[in-house]
Image (cartoon, rainbow, N blue to C red):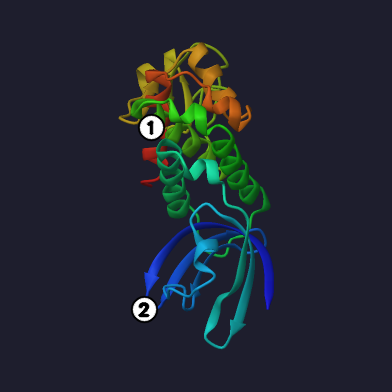
């Protein structure tokens, strides 16, 4: 038997009485495990297998693979689950996380990233409750952007990607791999570029450095959102 800490990403129906549960674990990364008998009314495990739960997981390993042995919730993030906006924000981000992360690739920093995200949403649910759909979608994309940066999907924002100049930046060009200055922008063309100025560039840089609580307070900005959406679309469709 193997023990590890885990966060429940999602749960699916599987066979007549079973579930498949997707976990992100501290020691083994993302795992998809069968949980036997959890669709039965008498199951004691099912409440511990709700998405967003932080759990102590025991894994059974046998000739047929691995399955859930036991699971005990350590934090159910009850406040998060009491607010529709918080569920929408966390659920949208978890769906993206699940698509971007491959099974079996362990990463301690990614585990703590996910746990810190949940703790913040749970703590700040009253603030999140007050947001409109546009603000929520903006924040979801901000967190997606931070995840992509953590996974190494980055762009050069130190100098022009063509001539290496350190001034007069006009565009963030995804095909060129980063910033492009005014002179080089005349000689290059791309459908995957976003106009950028010093203020927007500094705001983009700051997103990766501030804590999750302050991330929630970033004021909705159409130019910043357009830049971030371009990055998400470009790097998730390569």
On the question of residue 237 being in view, the answer is yes
Relative to 215, is 78 above or below?
Answer: below
Please tell me in which quadrant of the rendered image residue 166 appears. Answer: top right
Res. 15 mark? 2
The alpha-carbon separation of the residues under discs 1 and 2 comes to 35 Å
Q: Position of residue 9 (x, y in %)?
A: 49, 56
Q: Nearer the viewer, residue 198 or 14?
A: 14
Q: Position of residue 188 (x, y in %)?
A: 36, 24
Q: Residues within 10 Å of mark 1 (few under 14, many from 20)?
A: some
Instruction: Answer left or right for 235 relative to 45.
Output: left
Q: Foreground residue, 170 or 14?
A: 14
At 46% across and 51% down in the image, what residue appears? 100
From this view, report whether residue 207 is shown above or below residue 72. above
- Badge 1 marks a residue whose secondary structure is helix
Q: Is residue 34 above or below residue 27?
A: below
Question: Could you say which quadrant of the image residue 87 lies in?
Answer: top left
Q: Residue 36, image x and y in percent?
A: 48, 78
> Along the horizontal axis of the image, is 226 left or right of 104?
left
Residue 158 visible in the snapshot: no
Give me the residue at 62% from left, 74% from top: 59
Residue 38 appears at what percent x and percent y?
Answer: 46, 73
Q: Residue furthest left?
A: 191
Of marks 1 and 2, the one in the foreground: 2
Q: Residue furthest bottom?
A: 63
According to the image, label 1 marks what residue? 137
């Amino acid at each position: 038997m193997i023990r590890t800490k885990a966060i429940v990403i999602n749960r699916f129906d599987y066979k007549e009485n079973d579930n498949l549960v997707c976990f992100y674990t501290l020691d083994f990364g993302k795992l998809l495990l069968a949980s036997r008998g959890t669709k039965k009314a008498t199951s004691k495990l099912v409440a511990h297998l709700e998405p967003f739960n932080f759990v102590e997981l025991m894994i059974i390993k046998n000739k047929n693979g691995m399955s859930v042995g036991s699971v005990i919730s350590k934090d159910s993030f009850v406040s998060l689950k009491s607010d529709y906006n918080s569920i929408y924000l966390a659920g949208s981000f978890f769906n993206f996380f699940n698509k971007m992360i491959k099974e079996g690739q362990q990463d301690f920093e990614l585990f703590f990233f996910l746990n810190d995200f949940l703790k913040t949403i749970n703590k700040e649910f009253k603030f999140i409750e007050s947001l409109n759909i546009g603000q929520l979608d903006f924040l979801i994309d901000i967190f997606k952007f931070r995840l992509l940066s953590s996974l190494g999907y980055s762009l050069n924002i130190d100098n022009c990607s063509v001539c290496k100049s350190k001034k007069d930046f006009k565009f963030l060009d995804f095909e060129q791999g980063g910033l492009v200055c005014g002179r080089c922008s005349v000689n290059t063309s791309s459908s995957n570029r976003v106009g950028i100025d010093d203020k927007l560039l500094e705001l983009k840089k700051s997103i990766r450095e501030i804590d999750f609580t302050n991330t929630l307070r970033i004021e909705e900005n159409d130019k910043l959102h357009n830049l971030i959406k371009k990055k998400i679309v470009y790097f998730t469709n390569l």
